Image (cartoon, rainbow, N blue to C red):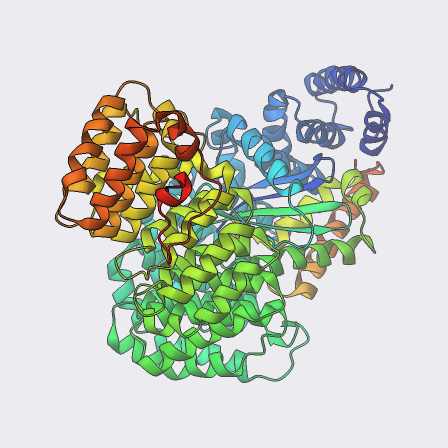
Amino acid sequence: MSPSVCLQEMIRVIRGARTQGEERGVIQRECAAIRAQFRQADSGGRSHNLAKLLYVHMLGYPAHFGQMECVRLIASSKYSEKRIGYLGAMMLLDEKQDASLLITNSIKNDLSHSSQHVQSLALCTLACMGSAEMCRDLAPEIERLLKASNSYIKKKAALCAVHIVRKIPELGEMFTPSAHSLLSEKNHGVLHGAVILITELCERNPDNLKQFRKSVPELVQIMKNLVTSGYSPEHNVAGISDPFLQVRILRLLRILGRNNDAASDAMNDLLAQVATNTDSSKTAGSAVLYETVLTIMDIRSESGLRVLAVNILGRFLLNNDRNIRYISMTSLQKIVQTDHTAVQRHRGTIVDCLKDQDASVKRRALELSLALVSAANIRSMMKELLLFLSTCPPELRSHAASGIFNAAGGDVRDETVPNLIQLITAASELHCYTVHKLYRALISDIVQQSLVQVACWCIGEYGDLLLKGECEEITPMQVTEDDVLDALETVLQSHMSTPTSRGFALTAIMKLSTRITNNVDRIRSVVSIYGSCIDVELQQRAVEYNALFKKYDHMRYFTMSYCTVILEFGCRSRLSLVLGY
Amino acid sequence: MMRFLLLFSRQGKLRLQKWFLPMTEREKKKIIRDMTTMVLARKPRTCNFLHWRDLKIVYKRYASLYFCCGLEDQDNELLALEVLHRYVELLDKYFGSVCELDIIFNFEKAYFILDEFLMGGEIQETSKQSIAKSIEASDMLQETMEEYMSKPAF
């Protein structure tokens, strides 16, 4: 293949390679030719050789030998060579490469070039890969260009200034006066750049924040003009006039209004206007509404405005577009602690989203639902969450289960315990995880009775999984038989335990007699002690279990084995019935 | 700001990569690998947003190409969808019914167009016509020079 074959021909040949090895061979030959060409400094084919190298680089092959060629091409007087040279610099040179400093001088010269397109190349490259030293060196040039008469250059200089401020925040004060005057520009590109620059300046320096708060009325006016202006073909996107600029202004207003009553007051009416009038049938409008809601929630807005914002999020939850449902939930999640009552009003819709097809939406709905569980709604929420647990995708199960356990606090009614147990039995993949989690919960706190009861039941049923010490979803604790029995006995003896909980604990201890090997004697003695317990119910159970040990030991394994039938908690079944006496 | 913009095919072949923050080659390769794996694994009719490390990932499929960008916490995901769409519109206008092959064989032009639309991870121009005019003018400048030199550009 001749070395001066054009770029497209080379691409065709590379794509024609049938195997990875063949492709590598072609590329090695091409790179060798390109290298030779670079060394020759042949003035004719320089741009297309670099272009070929950049293509090879994108395929993932090394291309660092092209760095110096970029430097040479940038210094050329031909526009086509500069263009590809700067592109090469942005792709191959970053601030970590030494060669990047070599282009500083070329950039400096090109910033004052007579052609705005050459200036543009320099500005773009500086904003893309300018190191801190380059920025410091060229900042005065950028400041000068911010005052240039050409909007094309001004908008690019503004973003270059943003990059410089990000790299060296102290240089921000150099740009503050220009940033302010740029707000009176009519050109949307320049305005957009100015708003971003002011945002960056305010985020880095609280003094700037104070100063630019004075610009709130000006920003409000610009927004008003955008919102109330008629159809503008140049900036219209789905009925919204320049949504990009609107969103940036709203974001800046958020920063300026935060923690400041005066600024928040000044933007209150505008935010209400945008929130009510923006058409959200397409993404562009929804993007603006979304940003408006974020701003309202973050500044010192009136309560009426806050409710309006939450209602918008509630409306978003019903939107057909799942993207909008998703971001609605992430937003609600952020405010569920501070505006709990307002979010509660939309609980029904949120719970419905548990059934959404999209896994991301489901996950968000789960997070939000768990955050919304309160004493007032716990019954219905438990029902929904338990239903969710039975049908949800595997990756969400453990998170849902632990959330439900945590929520199953003291306010839970009795039906929840058997329901939860039923569900745990059904989710066989989760037995190991569940028993570990519940054991951990039990040893840390035995106040919540329903949790205690479910935990005891689980430990009795799946104690062998607990003692084995392996678990996929979490790092398991190493638990000995003594540890488990200690935990259950603590429940038995604690004055905080209700009789029901004691019953659960005793039964669990008994069940463990078939699942452990070393401590059966300990179990036997516990059971016999409780044979004379004051609590009649407990005494009855203990006597029956004692009998199992003494007279019916051969049946102990059968009756205490894995329980696949859930006993009705309404009627107390007696072992006497099972044993037939 | 946008941290990066990637274009890749359904087979995971990279067609364009723009990085708005300095990163080592190793980091770039890791991100490319992670993005292609994550996005290509998504089922159809799921939402276009993902979470990865501390970034929000927004992606959209156009014909055989995935457009994928990484955003910071304060960036508006819905607007990012509009940004990706705007870029596709610009490519479409320039190439006339753009397809993946156009971007493969004219990748440098795809970059030139991107560099008129985004800069330093932010939007530099919100008017489609304005960008189209600048690209046209730059191309004219290049052609005039090449006519003078009477040699093909690339």
| Residue A375 on image: x %, y % | 29, 66
The image shows residue A246, relative to residue A568, as above or below, that is below
- The reply to whether residue A23 is in sight is yes
Q: Residue at x 23, y 25 (%)?
A: A482
Q: Identify the image quadrant of residue B136.
A: bottom right
The image shows residue A410, relative to residue A133, as above or below, that is below
| Residue A404 on image: x %, y % | 38, 52
Q: Which sits in the foreground, A76 or A248?
A: A248
- The reply to whether residue A242 is in sight is no
Q: Residue at x 62, y 61 (%)?
A: B82
Q: Which sits in the foreground, A149 or A34?
A: A34
> Is residue A348 toward the left or the right of residue A36 in the image?
left
- Which quarter of the image is occupied by the N terminus of chain A? top right
Q: Which sits in the foreground, A317 or B88?
A: A317
Total count of labels: 0
The image shows residue A19, relative to residue A530, as above or below, that is above
Q: Residue at x 44, y 43 (%)?
A: A398
Q: Residue at x 39, y 36 (%)?
A: A461
> Is residue A55 toward the left or the right of residue A95 in the image?
right
- Which quarter of the image is occupied by the C terminus of chain A? top left
| Residue B17 on image: x %, y % | 63, 39
| Residue A539 on image: x %, y % | 20, 44
> Is residue A157 toward the left or the right of residue A506 in the image?
right
Q: Which sits in the foreground, B49 or A186?
A: B49
Q: Identify the image quadrant of residue A153.
A: bottom right
